[in-house]
């Protein structure tokens, strides 16, 4: 699959843009705040109906406008397809999503136009707390399986409700029955979430390690760390362990008014030998691990969707040496189309890169 053309109207800083693209590597370069990242963001929105940067669609519309339109033409050996998304942001959010002029939903976009987005902020996914790593895993699983997103939402809603009841149960035992009912839902939905996460990690952890070795030549280990302990058994075993764990910490949860175990407390552990990458990895090593996570994400999407995702790499070359840059760009040899940004037209020896100059709200192919 190739993104052959991209259309933006009233999106971010672009009043109107029609851009033709080719297979391989497209490098968008220019000064800061000229709109390079906005191009990658538009592609990701066309794939997922979400922005990797903005919390509200309102922030995506060009200043002074109340709507924006994005479009893409995708080519494959046996077909050409078109995506168009019209979004109204005021007075209320409304969207019209079309694939080949017929209405479509989010899962169809992901399946037709899979994308993986890497940004400098992905470094925080490695350096900071577990919530960012869980969010990464949940985002990937939600695209692989729409049913996972529904189960995760059910679990997170139950945690919120249960926390509120725990605060009340500390003062009165009359809330015990309500708490028991919520525990049943928490265990059922939480076990489903854990089962799906562990199923993915059974192959994903090895993919991250393999990709990191490909990029850097070094080794890293990736594993799922659960607040419940060892989850090597079946889903039924996980539910039983979850129930026993909740019973053992009931008093502590009442005292603190918060749910202390479950998928919302878990983490992805990434280590070099016995050293945690988060604390002991160099900036370059941590960035390489973040990139390995994204490239493993691309492999997981490809295996499920039978299409190679477009790689959207925002400022990926920061703190990567020439050897690692070459490794990243060699992914084109495996059939990936790559769109990347840089403040300079970075020379890559032996690579066929098409250059685009970005500035003054325009994009000019060179």
Image (cartoon, rainbow, N blue to C red):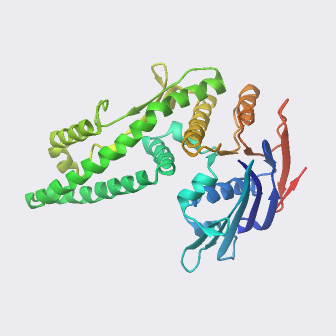
Q: Position of residue 284 (x, y in %)?
A: 64, 30
Residue under the image location 69 percent in, 33 percent down: 319
Q: Is residue 145 above or below residue 279?
A: below
Q: Locate residue 134 relative to residue 286 in the image: left or right.
A: left
- Which residue, as the protein is rendered here, is positioned at the far bottom? 91
- Is residue 184 visible in the rendered structure shown here? yes
- Which residue, as the protein is rendered here, is positioned at the far right? 366
Counting labels gives: 0
Front residue of this view, candidates 37 and 208: 208
Front residue of this view, candidates 265 and 111: 111
Q: Position of residue 96 (x, y in %)?
A: 60, 72
- Which residue, as the protein is rendered here, is positioned at the far left? 173
Residue under the image location 47 percent in, 46 percent down: 141
Q: Is residue 203 above or below residue 5?
A: above
Residue 172, picture quadrant: bottom left
Q: Locate residue 268 relative to residue 191 in the image: left or right.
A: right
Residue 6, picture quadrant: bottom right
Q: Position of residue 16 (x, y in %)?
A: 79, 68
Residue under the image location 12 percent in, 58 percent down: 177
- Is residue 53 visible in the rendered structure shown here? no
Q: Position of residue 309 (x, y in %)?
A: 64, 45
Q: Locate residue 129 relative to residue 14 in the image: left or right.
A: left
């Amino acid at each position: 699959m190739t993104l052959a053309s991209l259309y933006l109207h009233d999106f971010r800083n672009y009043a109107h843009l029609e851009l033709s693209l080719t297979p391989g590597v497209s490098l968008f370069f220019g000064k800061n705040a000229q709109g390079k990242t906005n191009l990658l963001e538009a592609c990701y929105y066309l794939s997922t109906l979400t922005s990797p940067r903005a919390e509200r669609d309102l922030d995506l519309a060009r200043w002074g406008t109340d709507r924006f339109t994005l479009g893409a033409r995708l080519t494959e050996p046996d077909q050409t397809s078109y995506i168009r998304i019209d979004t109204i942001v005021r007075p209320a959010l409304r969207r019209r999503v079309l694939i080949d002029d017929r209405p479509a939903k989010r899962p169809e976009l992901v399946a037709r136009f899979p994308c993986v987005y890497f940004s400098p902020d992905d470094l925080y996914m490695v350096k900071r707390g577990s919530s960012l790593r869980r969010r990464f895993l949940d985002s990937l699983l939600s695209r692989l399986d729409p049913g996972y997103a529904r189960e995760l939402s059910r679990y997170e809603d139950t945690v919120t409700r249960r926390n509120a009841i725990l605060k009340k149960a500390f003062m009165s035992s009359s809330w015990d029955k309500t708490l028991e009912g919520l525990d049943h839902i928490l265990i059922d939905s939480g076990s489903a979430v854990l089962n799906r996460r562990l199923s993915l990690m059974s192959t994903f952890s090895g993919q991250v390690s393999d990709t990191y070795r490909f990029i850097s030549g070094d080794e890293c280990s990736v594993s799922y760390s659960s607040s419940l302990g060892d989850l090597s058994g079946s889903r039924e075993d996980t539910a039983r362990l979850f129930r026993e764990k909740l019973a053992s910490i009931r008093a502590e949860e009442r005292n603190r008014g918060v749910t202390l175990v479950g998928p919302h407390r878990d983490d992805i552990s990434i280590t070099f030998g016995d050293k945690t990458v988060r604390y002991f990895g160099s900036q370059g090593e941590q960035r390489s691990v973040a990139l390995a996570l994204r490239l493993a994400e691309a492999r997981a999407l490809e295996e499920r969707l039978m299409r190679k995702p477009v790689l959207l790499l925002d400022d990926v070359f920061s703190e990567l040496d020439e050897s690692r840059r070459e490794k990243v760009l060699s992914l084109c040899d495996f059939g990936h189309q790559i769109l990347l940004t840089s403040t300079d037209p970075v020379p890559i020896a032996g690579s066929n890169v098409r250059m685009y100059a970005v500035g003054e709200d325009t994009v000019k192919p060179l």
